[in-house]
Image (spheres, helix red, strand yellow):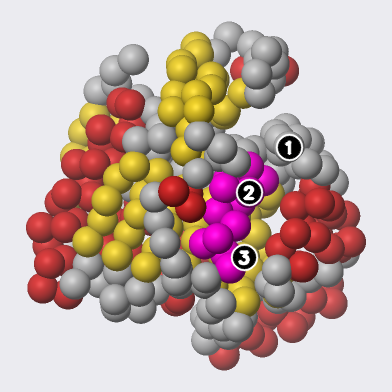
């Protein structure tokens, strides 16, 4: 499958950025100047020059490029060929700019899983960020009945990246549990780690939502939501908030840290987080 692309100028990025022309979500947002502002701010707050960053579900490379330009060593994973092509070109552009800062990125053209092999992936027709790995013999998700399918490679992160890692971003549309299972050694060798992870119970594969949160808590992470003013949240409270509203459209991005500061967005955000911690159920 191929898709037309176009290159846009992003103020503040310092380079042209290629997007998928027919995407309805990520592309238009980047064309207007940014993508996932809160997540990007939290991500960059923990990226240091010379550190190692892993981006699972890199899509067209927005987060990977940000980290490269900040001087990090980046390993980005994207299994869909026509999307990976765009990510690779964006990463190469960033590499050519960031060499003097020490930043460099590598693209791995497979999905992150619990073991090496192959799998099927359902491809969303409009939102090119919502492609989902399918369990063996599983039917298409109820909201993707007309989706095209593609066979992809699946690999363990531990077979391709060694720790320590400073920032780990996992946005794999429901495959987060399997990605973490294949990155156990990486977690063990990364004592100071910031994590951004999609938490979408509707699409989650391999475990119950509580299991995923308990795994992170048992690993020593302080958990919250990736917002403009994050605050530490208990597992029960996260599960309660995730259960509100339409399950297909629900879920949110988790923000978690281990042996790193949780509040990194300044005093104003810290004060807002205190207020939000009392107001939100």
Quadrant of res 215 = bottom right
Task: Compare residues 7 and 233 and report the one nearer the observer.
Answer: 233
Crowding at dot 3, Cα within 10 Å, few <14 / some 14-19 / many 20+, comes out as many
Q: Which is more toward the observer, 207 or 84?
A: 207
The residue where tag 1 is placed is 206
At 71% across and 35% down in the image, what residue appears? 205
Q: Nearer the viewer, residue 92 or 218?
A: 218
Choose top left, top right, bottom left or bottom right for residue 152. Answer: top left
The dot on residue 255 is: 3
Q: Residues within 10 Å of mark 1 (few under 14, many from 20)?
A: some
Q: Is residue 9 above or below residue 20?
A: below
- Residue 108 vertical placement versus 153 (above, below): below
Separation of residues labelled 1 and 2 (CA atoms): 10 Å
- Is residue 151 at all visible to an observer of this figure? yes
Q: Is residue 94 left or right of residue 231?
A: left
In magenta, the rendered stretch is: 177-188
Which image quarter is the N terminus in?
top left
Q: Is residue 268 above or below residue 6?
A: below
């Amino acid at each position: 499958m191929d898709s037309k692309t176009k290159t846009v100028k992003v103020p503040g990025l310092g380079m042209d950025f290629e997007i998928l022309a027919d995407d309805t979500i990520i592309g238009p947002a980047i064309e207007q100047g940014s993508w996932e502002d809160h997540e990007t701010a939290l991500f960059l707050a923990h990226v240091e020059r010379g550190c190692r960053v892993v981006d699972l579900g890199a899509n067209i490379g927005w987060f990977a490029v940000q980290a490269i330009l900040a001087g990090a060593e980046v390993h980005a994973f994207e299994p869909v060929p026509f999307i990976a092509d765009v990510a690779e070109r964006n990463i190469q552009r960033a590499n050519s700019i960031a060499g003097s800062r020490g930043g460099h990125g590598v693209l791995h053209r497979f999905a992150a899983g619990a073991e090496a092999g192959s799998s099927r992936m359902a491809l969303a027709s409009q939102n090119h960020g919502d492609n989902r790995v399918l369990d063996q013999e599983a039917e298409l998700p109820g909201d993707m009945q007309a989706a095209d399918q593609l066979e992809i490679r699946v690999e363990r992160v531990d077979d391709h990246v060694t720790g320590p890692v400073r920032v780990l971003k996992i946005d794999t549309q429901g495959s987060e549990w399997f990605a973490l299972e294949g990155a156990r050694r990486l977690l063990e060798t990364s004592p100071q780690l910031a994590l951004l992870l999609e938490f979408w119970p509707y699409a989650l594969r391999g475990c119950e939502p509580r299991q995923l949160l308990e795994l992170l808590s048992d690993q020593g992470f302080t958990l919250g939501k990736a917002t403009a003013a994050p605050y530490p949240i208990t597992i029960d409270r996260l599960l309660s908030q995730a259960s509100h509203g339409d399950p297909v459209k629900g879920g949110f991005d988790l923000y978690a840290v281990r042996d790193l500061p949780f509040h990194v967005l300044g005093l104003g955000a810290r004060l807002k987080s205190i207020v939000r911690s009392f107001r939100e159920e």
